[in-house]
Image (cartoon, helix red, strand yellow):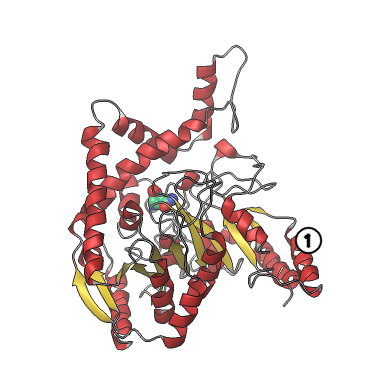
Amino acid sequence: VSSEEATKAHLERIEAVEGSINAFLHVNDEALAAAKQIDERRAAGEQLHELAGVPIAIKDVLTTKGMPSTSGSRMLEGWVPPYDATVVARLKQAGLIALGKTNMDEFAMGSSTEHSAFGPTKNPWDLNRIPGGSGGGSAAAVAALEAPIALGSDTGGSIRQPAAVTGTVGVKPTYGGVSRYGAIALASSLDQVGPVSRTVLDAALVHDVIGGHDPHDATSLEREWPSFAAAAREGADGADLTGVRFGVVKELDADGISADVQARFKDAVAVIEAAGGEVTEISAPSFKYAVAAYYLILPAEASSNLARFDSVRYGLRVEEPGQTVEQVMAASREAGFGPEVKRRIILGTYALSAGYYDAYYGSAQKVRTLIQRDLEEAFQKVDVLISPAAPTTAFKLGEKIDDPLAMYVNDITTIPANLAGTPGMSIPMGLGADGLPTGLQLMAPMFEDERLYRFGAAIE
Ligand code: GLN
């Protein structure tokens, strides 16, 4: 197939199903022209990247030159950034075709995409259910065949949890492995950009393109990464797990995980053992404090990051003649931010305020260190940790929207990797009794993303 044919087919699919899915906030009207150009370059004999001409959907948290980038918020409605995020620039450089921008919870806060200012995305498996979040748009687009691959961002699970509940593959790379330049910041010490796809190899190919050092991101790691695509290919070829040590995280196979997900997880363990993998139980006692620590650290960092939306430099401005700067700022933030964003700004500024800082933010940072130590200890004993990637299959639209705590505890399985900075992946784990997808999470030590691709490809 030519890139033009592939791109056209996906644009037609978008046209056909978007009315019911709502995965896209913006469709790129220059996608076909870009695809034709790739076909011409290839016909002229130019050596192009393996993924050149392949269409890809991009989460709206990433800035795209000439295409609106809202991060799911009214605050940035209509804003067209003058620059590409590094990951987007690298995709273009490799010749991939941006299909458009995908829906998400406002500023990536949420687990259902219902906090988007532009209406929720529906799960293609059941239109009455959520596609996960915050990156529900990217996962739904891949699951609904609107895009073969997509980019997401994962601060507390926003790539892995949507992947789990839509039957797709999602990867959160090691912190610093992929540039955050041009990723609209939620919590800077937790955010990572990564791929969503239908196979482990596809995710690896995208990761190889977007990863690696970027001088524009001060936390970007300066190191040589192996080819993740090569690891995925080797893993898929051999599919032999003899001698590989898998650890089941005891704390993530317990209360709060639905019977359905636990049953599929048991099956997954059996598959791993049948392929020669050694499975043992590992305890990570600090994981039980992970959600509490995360929902202090995240709002603290988010309240600080979102201070930039002051209605002066860019973004929404709501003003009446004669108002002071403070009044304009307050009115703009009141109109521009949705309820979940306001809740977290208030939580974050409270946690950071003098007198409370040590008790809340300080304690949360200590928990973070304990989680890192639990993981370091676990990885002395095993090569990879496994758990369900989400505690349940997709819940119903509206089910948790009025209960922030119910929404937050949904992140128990994914949050530890963000707090520790370690890489994590979700791969399809089969359908629950309700006919909905479940996800298997693999976690590896810092810098060892390669293991996820090798063993993920062997298991999938
Ligand atoms: N559900 C998490 C939250 O609401 C995930 C956020 C994310 O990864 N962007 O914070």
Q: Indicate the amino acid at tag 1.
A: Ala
Answer left or right for 237 relative to 444: right
Q: Please name whichever residue, 143 or 362, is drawn nearer the observer in this view of the structure.
A: 362
The residue identified by callout 1 is: 33
* Position of residue 287 measured from the top left corner of the image (x, y, whole percent): 23, 56
Res. 421 image quadrant: bottom left
- The residue carrying pointer 1 sits among few (fewer than 14), some (14 to 19) or many (20 or more) residues within 10 Å by Cα, namely few
CB of residue at label 1: within 8 Å of ligand 1?
no
Q: Position of residue 201 (x, y in %)?
A: 51, 75
Q: Is residue 258 above or below residue 373?
A: below
Residue located at (27% from left, 25% from top): 354
- Name the one closer to the observer, 239 or 208: 208
Figure check: 262 above or below 290: below
- Residue 206 in sight here: yes
Indicate the quadrant containing the C terminus: top left, top right, bottom left or bottom right: bottom left
Q: Is residue 200 left or right of residue 24?
A: left
